[in-house]
Image (cartoon, rainbow, N blue to C red):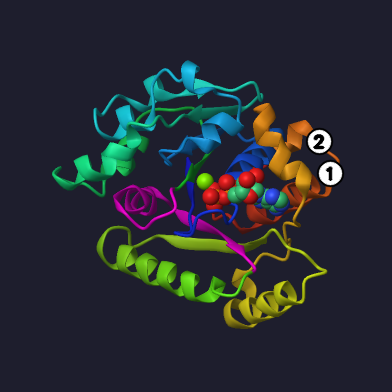
Amino acid sequence: MICIAVANQKGGVGKTTTAINVATALAATGWRTLLIDLDPQGNASTGIGVASGSRERSTYDLLIDQVPLRECIQETRIPGLDVVPATVDLSGAEVELVGIDNRTDRLKAALEGASDHDICLIDCPPSLGLLTLNALTAADTLLVPLQCEFFALEGLSQLLQTVERVQQRFNTSLGIVGVVLTMFDRRNRLTDQVSDDVRSCLGALVFETVIPRNVRLSEAPSHGLPALVYDHHCAGSQAYMALARELIGRLPERRIAA
Ligand code: ADP
Ligand code: MG
């Protein structure tokens, strides 16, 4: 199973929207996909249609109680897409992990458990705490959503320093599959300027696909549906399909979908 962490320590940059819609696009392409909700807010779980009342096992059980992966996985109504949902008790996990041996390896160990998936996406919380460190330690590669705003590059350099630290100490093979510009607004001059800066700084690391600011993307979660299902034709959905195609092309092990 290829494992991709969707991370950026800033909140509201499009991590969850990206995780949900890329996961849906991969599932639609024939990949057996697992979405792991590692944010105590549980937005990915809600957005994929798993309401808080119907979360049986969670990432808390997986990390803290070491419940086997298979038992924590729930089906979604999207064919080919399963989820390990998050519950609010995950907010305590950050503190509980501090006192545990191998505190950065918990997720990695859990994902070594049996599952039938080709790929998993981990939706990270907006911090560089132990939950995100667990994701970076478990992941093969990192997908970074970046909003084109003034301090975007400063935030990114902090993230890249953390990635370097993880590469040195916990996960020597961690890669970065790419940075995706989100909530892109062509009419905004600052967006263009930041986007130019990011591209000249990071070059080919930045995906060609940009995700436009699109109201359908923000409406979809309240219906418990990925935008790709809620409105397949909207500009946001089309952009996420394109991003998934570009992502597949960059993955180390390709798998031709059935
Ligand atoms: P994060 O997980 O990084 O906190 P979210 O994916 O939850 O970010 O996005 C933050 C908010 O912005 C949410 O309300 C989401 O619906 C909205 N949003 C995300 N991407 C877009 C977009 N491309 N266009 C419009 N709204 C978006
Ligand atoms: Mg989120």
Left or right side of 90 for 213: right
Please give the residue where the numbered disc 2 appears in the rendered image: 231
Q: Extreme right residue here?
A: 233
Q: Which mark is residue 234?
A: 1
Three-letter amino acid code of the residue under disc 1: Cys
Residue 249 visible, this orientation: yes
Residue 128 screen position, x and y as percent: 36, 58
The quadrant in which the C terminus is found is top right
Left or right side of 144 for 72: left
Three-letter amino acid code of the residue under disc 2: Asp
Residue 240 screen position, x and y as percent: 72, 49
Specify the segment rendered in magenta. 125-148
Q: Is residue 214 magenta?
A: no
Is residue 50 shown above or below 183? above
Are dots 1 and 2 in contact, CB under 8 Å?
yes
- For label 1, the SS is loop
How many other residues sit within 10 Å of disc 2, few (<14), some (14-19) or many (≥20)? some
Q: Which mark is residue 132?
A: none
